[in-house]
Image (cartoon, rainbow, N blue to C red):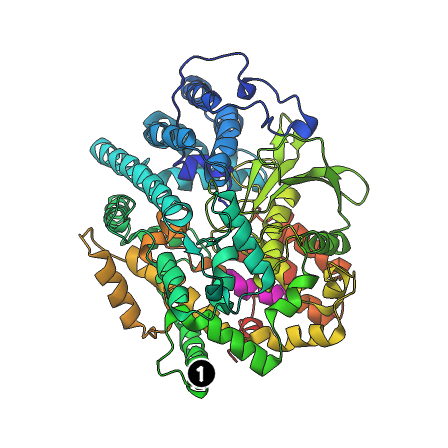
Amino acid sequence: MKKIPFLLILLTLVTFSACKQAKETKNPFFTEYQTPFQVPPFDKIDSTDYMPAYLEGMKQQMAEIDAIINNTAEADFENTILALDKSGLLLTKVSKVFNQMNEANTTPQLQEIARKLSPLTSKHHDDIVLNEKLFQKIKSVYENRNQMKLDDQQIRVVEKYYRDFVRLGADLPADKKDTLRKLNEKLSMLTLKFGENQLAETNKNFKLVIDDKKDLDGLPQGVIDGAAEAAKSIKMDGKWVFTLAKPSMIPFLQYAKNRDLREKIYRGYFMRGNNGNENDNKAIVAQIVKLRAQQAALLGYKSCAAYVIDDNMAKTPEAVDNFLMKLWKPALAVAKNEVKEMQKIIDREGGKFKLQSWEWCYYAEKVRKEKYDLDENELKPYFSLSNVRDGMFHVATQLYGITFTKRTDLPLFQKDIETFEVKEADGSPLGVIYLDYYPRESKRNGAWCTDFRSSGYLDGKKVDAIESVTFNLSAPTADAPALLTWDDVTTMFHEFGHSLHGLFTVGKYDRTAGNVPMDYVELPSQVMENWAGEPEVLKFYAKHYKTGEVIPDKLVEKVKKSGTFNQGFVTVEYLAASLLDMDYHNLTSPQDIDVLAFEKKAMDSIGLIQEIIPRYRSTYFSHIFSGEYAAGYYVYIWAAVLDADAFNAFKESGDIYNKDLAAKFRKYCLAESGNDEGMTQYKKFRGQEPSIDPLLVRRGLK
């Protein structure tokens, strides 16, 4: 998942605020970073530094806005649009660090700062986008843009800012602006609270503690060792601890023979935020949905989904719903066949029960072994984290000529993080990338990419990106390095793809550089996953961690043949969540809902089978209730059509490292991705609109 770039601060600023008032010269944010590449000096940043920097950043940006408004010269691109585009440098600087720390390395102090900041930053955002005098200046430039001798990109920036301000309520009458401000502030607090609750429910409020060795039957030794070390880390020596972090939970669901314990850990996972305790998210979800419907109506849209998607490639909720249902029918049919295959195994083994949702992983693993003679534990020894990392770097080097050099002299916020300097083929600088690998209680679940500094231009000089990629991968044990599942491998390639998008982005203006529609965002990431399983790529990085043996041809062939394994389930659970998201945000009027009843009705209406639950149930659906993907979770599979079609171009050429295609993809789909509308940029690369067929074939749905 790609965190929406902070260059959209004027569009989606729902960030945070802190508590110390006095400005201090020792505050690292107030001076230029004295570090290599000017990366954040994490070793010098204290939690007390954030609030003063935020307050000063907001103060400085408002002074910049006042200067635009009070300029007596006629509004033009330079004194209005460009001045707005380059405003808020300090605020951007501090927020990029704080937001990532609060998600990847949070503390009670940071969470308290976030709660205090939320209403402050919401007000600051509204003070800009609802400022009548500023809007009139922007409107003047917009109306006269074609007479100002602007180039194409300048006109695009003008049009984007004008549209932004209108969409965010700048054209509303004063009383409706006041109402909008109140809605925005409430939503900023609710989404923040949702995320805090989910973090607690995931990392603190559930642990499966095993003290009887018999309950470990079926688990691979590496998984057992990891659970023992997890227990030891919390002073429970001699026991085994499993958590809801996926590197811990998924292997347990796949291999543990104890059916009751599989149910216990899976129930702990899908009941997050739905336990009637202080972290319960049901009321919060209901309030968010209601307020978003009010917000959309106030802004003149039929629904929140209509508001969001109007700015996307899809354009309308109807187009999204139709697209999702075209995939739903074949995917559901495949998933039902997968159920039959697993039920046969249950019956054959004498089980007198029907397959349940918490047993899917366990019996799917049996199907994989039986149908493809492939056990994921055969693969893991070949997927050490360092080898996979080198593999994804190798692919980028082969495609684009860029190089990666490990740095050990950069300040870190966690000891396990690695940093790399990235250069062009000619040795010129491209940026820096941080890789944060392992789960911890202070980190939310999942994987994402953001940045500590965006690529762009300042005072006419190019600024290189500092990308940050965050994972939750299996940690090393005393006897083995971090060994990854196939899903972990593709996740690494995926998030790395986001970082390449950030590193390659070029553009003079923050509003458009790298700024793409939400349903384009996942193309740069998902396209990289395609290379991970190609035989010649596997031969490069898949080497046994003990012997150095390259992955055998027969194992590569098994991986290839099992490419459509379990894709009914994978597609159905994803589509179910996407359709649930759409149902919440297609509501055409504010209303009080019973969240569990709403969810059940939505899933019943599409015929979701009881053996599968949505990938994210309502009470832990952070993408849409604490992230930026409201009415947008569909974007992953929308972009999957693009990425499958794009990779098909390489396959059709006969060279997966086709340099000419790579150069075109880098130029039009990555570097200049914000220069025009998403489909226009894609067609510049491909020469035509994408076909859905490569995706259907890849997933075994055709």
From the viewer's perspective, is 172 left or right of 622? left
Q: Which residue is drawn at 41% across and 42% down?
A: 163
Question: Is residue 111 shown above or below 642?
Answer: above
Outermost left residue: 592
Q: Residue at x 51, y 33 (%)?
A: 96
From the viewer's perspective, is 679 left or right of 197? right
Q: Which residue is drawn at 34% across and 75% down?
A: 609
Outermost right residue: 426
Looking at the rendered structure, the secondary structure element under dot 1 is helix
Q: Position of residue 8 (x, y in %)?
A: 47, 38
Tell me the crowding category of disc 1: few under 14, some 14 to 19, or many 20 or more residues within 10 angstroms, Cα based.
few
Regarding residue 681, the answer to whether it shows in the image is no
Q: Please, what is the three-letter code of the amino acid marked with disc 1? A: Asn
In the picture of the structure, the residue carrying the numbered disc 1 is 337
Closer to the camera in the image, 264 or 647: 264
Q: Where is residue 80 in the image (x, y as percent from the top left)?
A: 47, 27
Q: What stretch of residues is rendered in magenta?
A: 638-647
Q: Position of residue 601 (x, y in %)?
A: 24, 67
Regarding residue 654, the answer to whether it shows in the image is yes
Q: Does the magenta stretch include residue 643?
A: yes
Closer to the camera in the image, 393 or 164: 393
Corner quadrant of residue 646: bottom right
Count of picture labels: 1
Q: Where is residue 104 in the image (x, y as percent from the top left)?
A: 50, 40
Question: Is residue 564 shown above or below 488?
Answer: below
Closer to the camera in the image, 612 or 188: 612
Majority secondary structure of the magenta segment? helix
Q: Which residue is drawn at 61% across and 40% down?
A: 467
From the viewer's perspective, is 623 left or right of 374? left
Q: Is residue 494 magenta?
A: no
